[in-house]
Amino acid sequence: MEQLTLISRFGTHHLPIETDTTIVHLAKKHQVRWGYACERGNCAQCRTKVVEGSEFLNEITEAEKLRLRKAERAEGYRLGCQIKIVKQGRVELAHRPY
Ligand code: FES
């Protein structure tokens, strides 16, 4: 079964895939500690490295283009409040705030 793996300094969590909802929302729902504040793409407290499964995620949002440097985006960094899974597949994400 496809799953979402969330890695933070508090541990590794395996969750069922849910589409069309943000990673910050999913983390909250499953009581996974994943830093966030604004949920609008401004604060970057939810900065996330996509380790695996970028092909199953939504396109980078305008907020991410404004908040993250191009080099960061090229290395796979995104914002957890902007990432949504759009189709079933194995996804692994790591919380990497500044
Ligand atoms: S929660 Fe502020 S940028 Fe994601």
Image (cartoon, rainbow, N blue to C red):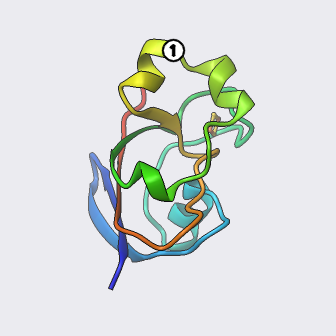
Give 35 or 20, whichever is nearer the viewer.
20
Instruction: Provide residue 36's location: percent of width, then percent of height.
Output: 58, 42
Residue closer to the observer: 47 or 18? 18
Residue at left offset 36%, top offset 74%: 3
Is residue 98 shown to the viewer in this render? no
Q: Amino acid at mark 1?
A: Lys
Ligand 1 neighbours mark 1 (CB distance < 8 Å): no
- Residue 86 image-quadrant placement: bottom right
Tell me the quarter of the picture where residue 98 sits.
top left
Give the residue drawn at x 61%, y 51%. Answer: 58
Residue at image position (62%, 57%) is: 22
10 Å neighbourhood of mark 1: few (<14), some, or many (≥20)?
few
At 62% across and 61% down in the image, what residue appears?
25
Residue 70 in view: yes
Quadrant position of ligand 1: top right
- Across and down, in percent, residue 10 comes to 28, 53
Can you name the residue that lies furthest to the front here? 55
Residue where numbered disc 1 is placed = 70
Q: How many marks?
A: 1
Image check: 65 left or right of 87? right
* As drawn, 67 above or below 95: above
In the displayed structure, does residue 58 sit left or right of residue 27?
right
Q: Secondary structure at mark 1?
A: helix
Vertical placement of residue 26 versus 37, above or below: below
* On screen, residue 47 above or below 58: above
Quadrant containing the N terminus in the rendered view = bottom left
* Left or right, 40 with reference to 25: right
User: Please, which residue is most extreme toward the bottom here?
Assistant: 1
Residue 18 drawn at (x, y percent): 55, 74
